[in-house]
Image (tube, rainbow, N blue to C red):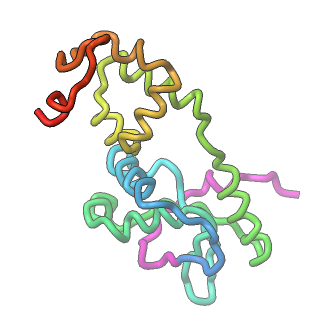
Amino acid sequence: MSEWKSPVYGVRAVPIEKIRANEYNPNHVAPPEMRLLYDSIKEDGYTMPIVCYYNAADDMYEIVDGFHRYQTMLDHKDIYDREHGMLPVSVIDKPIDERMASTIRHNRARGTHDVDLMSGIVAELHKIGRSDAWLSKHLGMDMDEILRLKQLTGLADLYKDKEFSKSWKPGKEITDADITG
């Protein structure tokens, strides 16, 4: 009996033209997360291989997991050029039913972000001087999401050193002239 060896120890560089999507992946990634995936691959490179089944009959690799990493290379010439059109692939050799189950397991195992932990990260990055624009770009969040996460950690602390407009003073009644200018 041979010793078990995880597929990741046999990662190979495969030309993207020899890789194709499967017909059964129910996973969908929204445009903001696709932009974040592009940014991640652009900044960090491919850090995880695409999981594929090798179909020897037609000499093609069929994706089991990693479709969006594959799609990122197809959609972005800069990534394609930098990687010389090659994707890291780990191969599993399973029948179609087990590949389908693997796809679902991979999709579901990614989990979700804990809101309290994310708000703590946003607060910490804010404390070290990262702007909302930086957070938006590097964490893939829109400004409303950043504001909501800041609200969870306490706006007063996050904005204590900020300068605000002097146009209104507490206790002063707002008139129509104040609104219309």
Q: In the rendered view of the protein, which quadrant contains the C terminus? A: top left
Q: Tell me the residue at 45%/26% (across/down).
A: 150
Q: In the rendered view of the protein, which quadrant contains the N terminus? A: bottom right
Q: Quadrant of residue 87?
A: bottom left
**Left or right: where does residue 97 sit relative to residue 71?**
right
x, y (%) of residue 14? 46, 68
Q: Tell me the residue at 60%/68% (across/down).
A: 52
- Furthest toward the bottom, the residue is 57
**Left or right: where does residue 86 sit relative to residue 8?**
left
x, y (%) of residue 170? 30, 12
Give whichever of 169, 88 is nearer the camera. 169
x, y (%) of residue 107? 65, 58
Give whichever of 3, 176 is nearer the camera. 176
Give whichever of 85, 114 is nearer the camera. 114
**Left or right: where does residue 83 sit relative to residue 113?**
left
- Furthest toward the left, the residue is 181
Q: Tell me the residue at 55%/65% (across/down).
A: 28
Q: Is residue 11 magenta?
A: yes
Q: Which residues are magenta?
A: 1-20
Q: Quadrant of residue 176?
A: top left
Q: Tell me the residue at 25%/13% (across/down).
A: 169
Q: Is residue 116 magenta?
A: no
**Left or right: where does residue 102 sit relative to residue 119?**
right
Q: How many marks?
A: 0
x, y (%) of residue 71? 43, 68
